[in-house]
Structure formats: C-alpha cells, structure tokens
Amino acid sequence: MEKSIKQPVKSAVLKCGKRTYFFDVNIASNNNKYLKITESQFLGEGQNRKRNSFLLFSEDVKNFQNNLKEMAEFVAAQ
C-alpha cells in the first residue's frame, strides 16, 4: 500500500530569532481537524535543527486558547 503525504489545510510560520514555529491544521482519519505546532531551533552551522512538535485536537482548542491568553497576559505585565 502506498502512503500518501498529507498536506496541511492551513499553515502559518512565525520566525523568532533562532527559532521558527510552524502552525499546521490537518485532517485526522476521522475527518476532525487538529493543529500541529512545531518548533524548529537553529543549533549552529553544520548541525541539524532541533525540532519539537505537539498536537492540539479540536475539542481542546478553547481551553488551550484561554490558558495561553492568561499566561501571555501575565508575562506581558511583568
């Protein structure tokens, strides 16, 4: 069986110095959307990039958004 490469239905990129963040919305096998957030960190010339990812499923988006907003406001207030 040939494996097809999934293309995100929506993507965005955020560059922050030596780090780049990728935001990709994909469709799961059950036809639900999910968000994959990947951090790519530049470690130096001749070295591989360090990558970390996590998935955020549609049923968790609202709670994640609320907590992120709360923490971002706290950090910004310092």
Image (cartoon, rainbow, N blue to C red):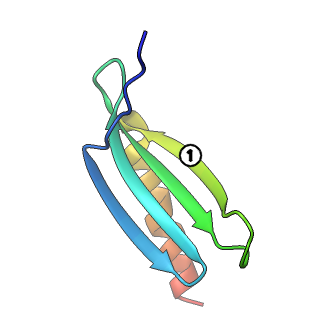
Residue 75: percent from left, percent from top: 57, 81
Q: Residue at x 71, y 78 (%)?
A: 45
Q: Residue at x 36, y 19 (%)?
A: 29
Q: Left or right: 68 with respect to 32?
A: right
Residue 71: percent from left, percent from top: 54, 69
Q: Residues within 10 Å of mark 1 (few under 14, many from 20)?
A: few
Image quadrant in which the N terminus is located: top left
Residue 13: percent from left, percent from top: 38, 67
- For label 1, the residue is 54
Residue 42: percent from left, percent from top: 65, 73
Farthest left residue? Answer: 9
Is residue 45 or residue 17 the one in the foreground?
Answer: 45
Relative vertical location of residue 14 with respect to residue 37 in this rendering, above or below: below
Image quadrant in which the C terminus is located: bottom right
Q: Which residue is drawn at 40% across and 56% down?
A: 23
Q: Left or right: 47 with respect to 19?
A: right
Relative vertical location of residue 75 with respect to residue 21 in this rendering, above or below: below
Examine the image and state in which quarter residue 65 appears.
Answer: bottom left
Is residue 63 or residue 26 the one in the foreground?
Answer: 26
